[in-house]
Image (tube, rainbow, N blue to C red):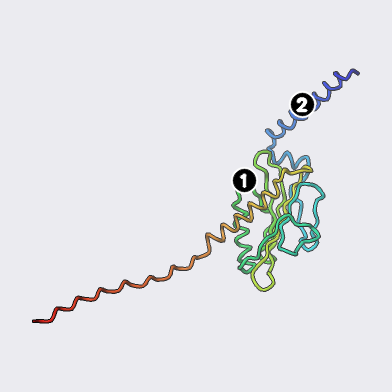
Amino acid sequence: MSPLRFLGLVFAALFGAFALLVLAFNTYGREASWEAVFGSPDLGPYDFSVPSRTGKLNDSLACPADECKKGIPDIETRRYDLPPASLFAVVEKVVRHLPGKVRVVGANPVNTRLRAIVFSPALRMPSTLSLMVTPARGGGSFLYIYSRSQIGYYDLGRNTANVVALIAAIDAQLAATTPTAPAPAQPAPAKPTPARPAPAK
């Protein structure tokens, strides 16, 4: 077989595979097509006490300082001046209203853990988003986040971008719901002293 004929067969096979993928997307939908090939998009719970990574460039881990060291976090989260239950309620609200398609598959306000499937905008490729809220030493709460893709070796930074956007949305929600202190009252202007009449001559 000549090299040109071999290349022609390769391109024909690739074109056929692409055509089948487009047909599947149009027939079954993007999410259902990925699930038919790769299985359930839900990758299951994540154990933050024993943090592990995929070993690929398709995940992102965010933890408080000095936590998750074995997982080598990509992002450091701060301490929140809220009890865990209150922070978890805000986190759940933000996740359920993230832009794009999001499917919450587990939300437990008792142990303050949440898991959701986040689909990419165009191809609807799924990532599993895991979150945990814990009490912080000295008061307040800590937030842990892990996002991992089901498909592909490299996510083009999508999981890290999702985690950064989620933290920013949580901070914005907290800022919007935190009452601002009233401005201090301004002292009333002093009344002018009436002029004293001149003495009679």
In the picture, the quarter occupied by the N terminus is: top right
Q: Nearer the viewer, residue 117 or 156?
A: 156
Query: What residue do we see at 74% from left, 44% from top?
Result: 155
Res. 130 visible in picture: no
Find numbered disc 2 in the image and state the secondary structure of the residue it sits on: helix
> Mark 1 = which residue?
100
Q: Nearer the viewer, residue 92 or 169?
A: 169
- What amino acid is labelled 2 in the image? Phe
Please state the horizontal and vertical placement of residue 177, each as a whole percent of the image.
53, 62
Task: Name which of mark 2 and mark 1 comes first in the sequence.
Answer: 2
Please state the horizontal and vertical placement of residue 23, each as a whole percent of the image.
71, 30
**Taking 185 as reference, is 171 left or right?**
right
Q: Nearer the viewer, residue 27 or 149?
A: 149
Query: What residue do we see at 64% from left, 69% from top?
Result: 140
Residue 19, quarter of picture? top right
Q: Which residue lies most toward the left here?
A: 201
> Mark 2 = which residue?
15
Res. 71 visible in picture: yes
Q: Mark 1 Cα within 10 Å, few/some/many (few <14, many 20+)?
A: few
Residue 64, quarter of picture? bottom right
